[in-house]
Image (cartoon, rainbow, N blue to C red):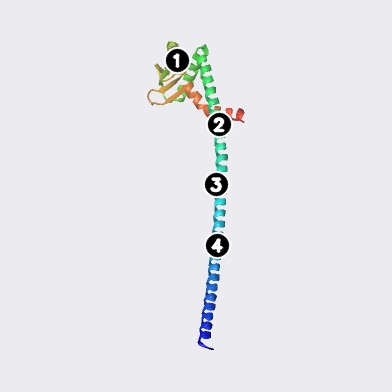
Amino acid sequence: MDIAEKIMAIETEIIDEVKEKNDSQIEKKKEELKERYDDFQKEIKNEQENILNEYKSRAEQKKEQIISRAILEKKNSRRKKLNDLINDFIDELHSKLNDFTDQKDYFLFIIDSIKEAAGELDDSEFIILLRNKDQNLKADLEEHLEKEMENYKFEIELMDKIKTGGFIIKAKNRQQLIENTFTALIDSFREEIAIELKNNILT
């Protein structure tokens, strides 16, 4: 083999080797790109699944919030309706009791209630507090109490605090008292009134 042939053979060998290396590098690059592409696809898929799960979670939370808000609104509506009914009932009761204070039986109610309350307090001297509007009853009350409860002593005073009728009795020496005003009586039955209205009207 002459020099020219040897040179050509070497060139061919070099070119083939370069091609082979080039093909190998290309193939390796392809594999790298494919691997990166597969990883990218997996990443996209995972991201899509995360987004979908997040959307489902938010949708469920939103649904629960809507349901909770609806339940709360219903409860608030029922509570408001009950409070309105209670207030209307109490207003009507106050009106009827106010009418009662203009009747003769109101005086008898005061007398009987004072007797009962005085028996519950461990004392013999009392202060009776009436509303200003009951000033016309003061003299008759003093006369009746003096006759019917001669072992007790009563002082009757008027005060602005009492607005709706009834009275407050205070043990003069022991500072005990019983509030028997119409407002106090109604307040003591307020919970019972609420239960009755709730059971019989809102059910």
Q: Position of residue 48 (x, y in %)?
A: 56, 54
User: How many neighbours does mark 4 have within 10 angstroms: few (below 14), some (14-19), or many (20 or more)?
Assistant: few
Residue underneath mark 2: 77
Q: Are marks 1 and 3 in contact (CB under 8 Å)?
A: no
Residue underneath mark 1: 145
Report whether 74 appears left or right of 157: right
Secondary structure of the residue carrying tag 2 is helix
Q: CA distance from mark 3 to mark 4?
A: 31 Å
Label located before the other in sequence (1 or 3): 3
Report whether 160 appears left or right of 7: left
Residue at 61% across, 28% down: 200
Q: Nearer the viewer, residue 190 or 86?
A: 86
Q: CA distance from mark 4 to mark 1?
A: 105 Å
Residue underneath mark 3: 58
Name the amino acid, label 1.
Leu
Q: Are marks 4 and 1 in contact (CB under 8 Å)?
A: no
* Eye-nearest disc, 1 or 2: 2
Residue at 54% across, 75% down: 19
Residue underneath mark 4: 37
Name the amino acid, label 3.
Arg
Q: Nearer the viewer, residue 39 or 58?
A: 39
Q: Quadrant of residue 63?
A: top right
Could you tell me how many numbered marks the image carries?
4
* Eye-nearest disc, 1 or 3: 3
Name the amino acid, label 2.
Ser
Residue at 48% across, 17% down: 110
User: How many neighbours does mark 3 have within 10 angstroms: few (below 14), some (14-19), or many (20 or more)?
Assistant: few
Label located before the other in sequence (4 or 2): 4
